[in-house]
Amino acid sequence: MTEHSTAISVMLIVPDADAAVAWYTSALGATALWDLGGVAGLALGSAAFFLHEVNPANPAETSPGRAGVTSSRIEVFTDDPDAFVERAVAAGATAGSPVADREAPWGTHRQGGFIDPFGHKWSVGDRSPLGPFPR
């Protein structure tokens, strides 16, 4: 990143950081950037994200399983959303909406999703809406 660039990332709160690192690297093909024990940095391609184990001293940040709900969705854009979702489900994720062609303002794209074993909802598509519109 340059001095004036900006990046946004997500930190997923999980009940067991070691298990989550193992699952995300195995199931999704994430690369481990660093691991401090309880907190880890991972990347899917050039998209970095972080994991943080539940900290009982900070009840405002908890895992979806402990909260009973999820309040965000992780969006991934890849050349082959079908294979990405299939790999996650084969590794223990719960299938969400099936990958299918969908109409969107930026054109037809393939999108589907899953819920990972830690309760986080993932939406996987082949075309990112991140950019100026109309195109």
Image (cartoon, rainbow, N blue to C red):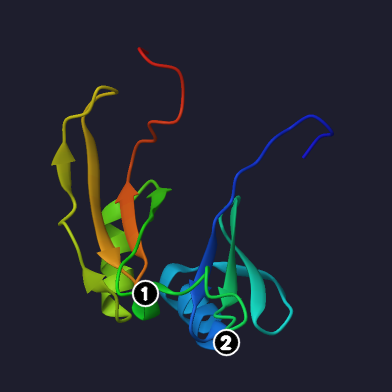
Horizontally, is 41 left or right of 67 in the view?
A: right
Q: Secondary structure at mark 2?
A: helix
Position of 20 relative to 96 (above/below): below
Q: Residues within 10 Å of mark 2 (few under 14, many from 20)?
A: some
Question: Where residue 134 sits: x, y (%)?
Answer: 35, 12
The extreme right residue here reads 3
Question: Where residue 118 sits: x, y (%)?
Answer: 39, 77
How far separated are the C-alphas under marks 1 and 2? 20 Å
Disc 2 marks which residue? 18
In the rendered image, the quadrant that contains the N terminus is top right
Residue at 60% over, 75% down: 58
Residue 118 visible? The answer is no
Residue at 37% over, 67% down: 120
Which numbered dot is residue 38?
none
Residue 57 visible? The answer is yes
Q: Residues within 10 Å of mark 1 (few under 14, many from 20)?
A: few
Q: Amino acid at mark 1?
A: Ala
Position of 80 relative to 24 (above/below): above
The extreme top residue here reads 134
Disc 1 marks which residue? 67
Q: Amino acid at mark 2?
A: Asp
Report which quarter residue 38 is drawn in: bottom right
In the rendered image, the quadrant that contains the C terminus is top left
Q: Secondary structure at mark 1?
A: helix
Question: Where residue 95 sits: x, y (%)?
Answer: 20, 68
Q: How many numbered discs, if any?
A: 2
Report which quarter residue 97 is drawn in: bottom left
Marks 1 and 2 close (CB-CB < 8 Å): no
Residue at 50% over, 80% down: 20
Query: Between tags 1 and 2, which lies in front?
Result: 1
